[in-house]
Amino acid sequence: MKKWSGSFRIWHWVNAVVVMGLLGTIFLRETFLNVRENAQTIADQLIKIGVTISNEQAKIVAKSLFAPMWDWHIYLGYALAFLVVYRIALFFTQSGKQSFQFKELDLHHKLVSVGYVVIYVALFFMALSGLIIHFYQELVLLKETAHDIKELHEAVYNIILIFVPLHVAGVVVADIRDEKGIISNMINGN
Ligand code: HEM
Ligand code: HEM
């Protein structure tokens, strides 16, 4: 079984919380705090008490409800950018490179490690593209360029969305079947 240093385990769990938090902000953006749907609800409810507001006014109210939540996408985004750099540093430690010593792995673990390479590239891209969209004015980029990068940011988001449940299900199944203790190993290191 793999051996995880204390700093790797801290990285793993903080990264897990941050990535799930980022997915949580997307979930809220698309559901309870969805600007278009809430603007409609606000306008509909006000009409019932005899107040008519324009679509634009309703959107301003809906956006003011959404904005404090979305700030968390940015805060967690900074945390992710830091964690990506932290992970690059961990590649120079035994814990950080053991999943990628392909010669020593059987076919199943080779495929698992390929999955890890894909998620690391995706996380690196999300951190970089997220920072670029957030700071596009400071970087003197055109709005259109920032928009194109945002489309890529949204497309790569799907990789994260697929990886997380597959990964969690994968380690749970491994723990039940033939790699007993794989999860507690990532918690207490042995
Ligand atoms: C709460 C649910 C989670 C559990 C129980 C869990 C558990 C584990 C375990 C047991 C391993 C070691 C697997 C092995 O020996 O190959 C692992 C590795 C890993 N986990 Fe998670 N994980 C969780 C959430 C996440 C999330 C949300 C991410 C975010 C992307 C993540 C990213 C990773 C990565 C990248 C590795 C590979 C580490 C390496 O060898 O470089 N995990 N996880
Ligand atoms: C796992 C990591 C991340 C995921 C899954 C993720 C996901 C997304 C998604 C799906 C969108 C599009 C929302 C929409 O228009 O409906 C988005 C937008 C955005 N993200 Fe991320 N993101 C991540 C990391 C980051 C990071 C590291 C930053 C940088 C601080 C960042 C900053 C932004 C910004 C500025 C937008 C554009 C918001 C807008 O124009 O309304 N994201 N993100």
Image (cartoon, rainbow, N blue to C red):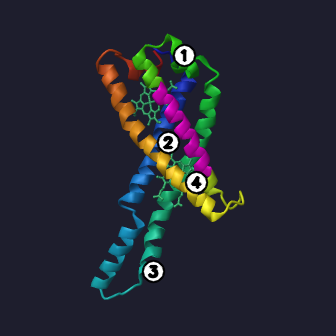
Mark 2 Cβ and ligand 2 under 8 Å apart: yes
The numbered disc on residue 101 is: 1
Helix, strand or loop at mark 1: loop
- Across and down, in percent, residue 54 comes to 41, 84
Q: Earlier in the sequence, mark 3 or mark 2?
A: 2
| Main secondary-structure element of the magenta-colored stretch | helix
Kind of residue at badge 3? Gln
Q: Distance between the Cα atoms at labels 3 and 2? A: 34 Å
Q: Residue at x 62, y 33 (%)?
A: 86
Question: Which of the two marks, 1 or 3, is nearer to us in this view?
Answer: 1
Please report contact status of discs 1 and 2: CB closer than 8 Å, yes or no: no
Q: Residue at x 40, y 62 (%)?
A: 33
Magenta stretch contains residue 128: yes
- Across and down, in percent, residue 117 comes to 52, 30
Kind of residue at badge 2? Val
Q: Distance between the Cα atoms at labels 1 and 2? A: 27 Å
Q: Residue at x 45, y 41 (%)?
A: 159
Which residue is under mark 2?
A: 18
Q: Earlier in the sequence, mark 1 or mark 3?
A: 3
Q: Distance between the Cα atoms at labels 4 and 1? A: 33 Å
Quadrant of the drawing holding the N terminus: top left
Examine the rendering and report whether any part of residue 62 can be seen. Answer: yes
Bounds of the magenta segment: 114-131
The numbered disc on residue 149 is: 4
Q: Quadrant of residue 89?
A: top right
Dot 3: within a 10 Å radius of its alpha carbon, few (fewer than 14), some, or many (20 or more) residues?
Answer: some
- Across and down, in percent, residue 13 comes to 48, 32
Examine the rendering and report whether any part of residue 187 can be seen. Answer: no
Image quarter for ligand 1 equals: top left
Question: Which of the two marks, 3 or 4, is nearer to us in this view?
Answer: 4
Q: Distance between the Cα atoms at labels 4 and 2? A: 22 Å
Kind of residue at badge 1? Gln
